[in-house]
Image: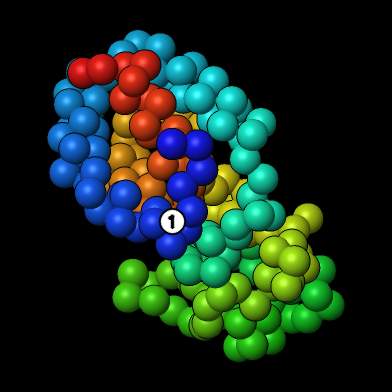
């Protein structure tokens, strides 16, 4: 399936949740030596054909964690003091992390571009984490992101084809 539409993505992800959990459990136990290279290739191939601006579901439905360096950098960009930025946009979640007060993201424009793209949080720069080193260690995040990001859905489906376990 090329690019699952957002409205059916959650159903597709739910239908495959058990299969994906079993797959990632096996992957942790028997990690191929070249997994990071394979994932890098799958990630690059998917993002050659995926335009995030057509979707931006990550920005609409989930908020990133904000590190102290993210807060400093973004506040400076917005010509605010870090505490002003925190008071205006952030809250502390149940894990004691800074996250957005509201969704969709306050910095998402109507054309799905980001007002603070050049200084966006590290979590946004690294999303959807499918090219991360030691990929097998982030299976819980990946399984969650399958229902958020069509690219992750496609990458995981292709991964299961290329690396049957």
Name which quarter of the figure residue 26 lies in.
top left
Name which quarter of the figure residue 84 lies in.
bottom right
Image quarter of the C terminus: top left
Q: Using the image, determine if residue 143 lies above or below residue 87.
A: above
Left or right of residue 99: residue 114: right
Q: Local crowd at mark 1 within 10 Å, few (<14), some, or many (≥20)?
A: many
Seen at 64% across and 87% down, the residue is: 88
Residue 60, percent across and down? 54, 69
Q: Using the image, determine if residue 85 lies above or below residue 127.
A: below
Seen at 75% across and 66% down, the residue is: 111
Instruction: Point out the residue furthest to the top here.
Output: 33
Left or right of residue 41: residue 23: left
Seen at 61% across and 82% down, the residue is: 89
Q: Using the image, determine if residue 80 lies above or below residue 153.
A: below
Seen at 16% across and 44% down, the residue is: 18
Name which quarter of the figure residue 56 lies in.
bottom right
Residue 70, percent across and down? 64, 62
Q: Secondary structure at mark 1?
A: loop
| Residue 67 visible somewhere in the drawing | no
Q: Using the image, determine if residue 38 lies above or below residue 92.
A: above
Residue beneath disc 1: 148
Left or right of residue 87: residue 24: left
| Residue 90 visible somewhere in the drawing | yes
The residue nearer to you, when weighing 150 against 75, is 150
Residue 4, percent across and down? 46, 47
């Amino acid at each position: 399936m090329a690019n699952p539409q957002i409205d059916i993505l959650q159903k597709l992800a739910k239908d495959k949740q058990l299969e994906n959990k079993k797959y990632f459990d096996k992957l942790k136990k028997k990690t191929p030596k070249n997994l990071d290279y394979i994932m890098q290739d799958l990630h690059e191939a998917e993002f050659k054909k995926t335009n995030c601006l057509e979707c931006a579901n990550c920005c609409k439905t989930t908020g990133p964690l904000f590190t102290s360096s993210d807060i400093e950098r973004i506040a400076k960009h917005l010509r605010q003091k870090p505490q002003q930025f925190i008071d205006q946009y952030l809250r502390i979640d149940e894990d004691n992390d800074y996250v957005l007060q509201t969704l969709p993201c306050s910095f998402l424009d109507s054309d799905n571009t980001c007002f603070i793209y050049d200084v966006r949080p590290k979590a946004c720069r690294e999303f959807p984490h499918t090219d991360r080193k030691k990929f097998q260690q982030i299976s819980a995040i990946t399984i969650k992101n399958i229902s958020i990001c069509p690219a992750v859905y496609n990458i995981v489906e292709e991964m299961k084809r290329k690396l049957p376990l």
